Image (cartoon, helix red, strand yellow):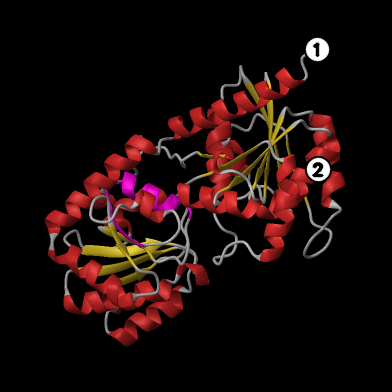
Amino acid sequence: MVRVCQLTTALWDGGIEERMARVVAGLDRAEFSTAWLALGHRANPALIARAGGDFPWEIFARHRRGVDLSLIPRIARSLRRLQPDVVHVHNWSTGLYGILAARLAGVPRVIYGVGGREVPEGPGRRQRAVAHGLAPMVSRFTTVCGFLADELAETWGVHRDRVEVVPTGIDVTHPGHDKAACRARFQLPEDALVIGTTSADRPVKRLSDLFEAAVAVARQEPRVHLLWIGEAETNSLMDRARAAGVADRCRAVGRIEDARAWARAFDVFVNTSDFEGTSNALLEVMAAEVAVVATRVGGTPELVQDGLTGLLVPPRSPAALEQALLRLAREPQTLHRLAEEGARLVRARHTTERMVAAYADLYRRTARRRRKEHRP
């Protein structure tokens, strides 16, 4: 039995947490036992249920803003009790605490994983210095794409061979509601060409670029409707749509549960982020055979291959985005080809089964190495 302990920034909805919930749920209980520790103040019961719900978990509240060194001994106490063979620490916000707590608790193997950048501009000088000091305490490194693997190796001062890329996997067997049901849900005409996104309105997402480009396209193409799903300022978006004269073709619906199930509401899904590792949202809409346009940043070009599985545009360029959207609005054959090829790529490379198998192999090898070292 291989005992694995996950340590994440939260036990709530998030890209890393959703990915690891799929991993924990998929690991063979006859071979692996899991514990899950997280920072924060509360846990999401639905996330725990999606992970299987049959494992110990614990939340560690911060006692102060900024760096809270009291987390280290508190996490270490739990690790001593759990006695894992491997601790898998996720992202920089848990890295310092998890790696030092594992060392303090005598955990033999630590895996450090990165699912994306916590700030768009990437690691700073201080983070790099601390990472170089922590690197000897880490057995293996993981990330979700080649871009982040190269960046991680440079940040931590380790050889690239120590970093394993495990592509994010999703459930491709349940594509969600059909197009007619999606259009009815959001009161969109069946013959409309729907452009939009699902995203929280954060600066890194650059939703203003999407709005500017999409409105320009809607003014030129009467069939185009705009759909925003996510935690955006819906009233503000609709005010801007009215000012632009396209309010009757704009839907801003706010956050909804299981947004992925409604992916087929879109004909074209747009990601305008300043940075992405591997976007879960892109994976989900591509699996549903929706064409995508995305900014050429981070790991996105490894998923969206320009002209093959989608279209890429420079970041912060509404004009380039407008031209890409106009192309898809006026070339239906291109739109359908990109949608089909994108779905084919995701279904071949980004399944939950492939991801779980890769992590199981990583945990197995890491634990086996520890046992060999401790063999008399």
- Please tell me whether residue 248 is drawn above or below residue 173 in the rendered image: below
- What segment is highlighted magenta in the picture? 277-295
Helix, strand or loop status at disc 1: loop
Give the residue drawn at x 32%, y 57%: 185
**Amino acid of disc 1:** Pro
Query: Badges 2 and 1: C-beta atoms under 8 Å apart?
Result: no
Mark 2: which amino acid?
Ala
Please identify the quadrant where the N terminus is shown. Answer: top right
Q: Nearer the viewer, mark 2 or mark 1?
A: 1
Residue found at the far bottom of this picture: 243
Mark yes or no: residue 18 visible: yes
- Counting from the top left corner in percent of width and height, residue 169 is at 45, 39
| Identity of the residue drawn at 33% across and 64% down | 196
Q: Mark 1 highlights which residue?
A: 376
| Label 2 Cα neighbours within 10 Å, binned few <14 / some 14-19 / many ≥20 | many
Name the residue that disc number 2 marks. Answer: 101
Q: Image height check: is 48 above or below 223?
A: above
219 sits to left or right of 265:
left
Work out whether residue 343 or residue 231 is closer to the camera in this orientation and state it: 343
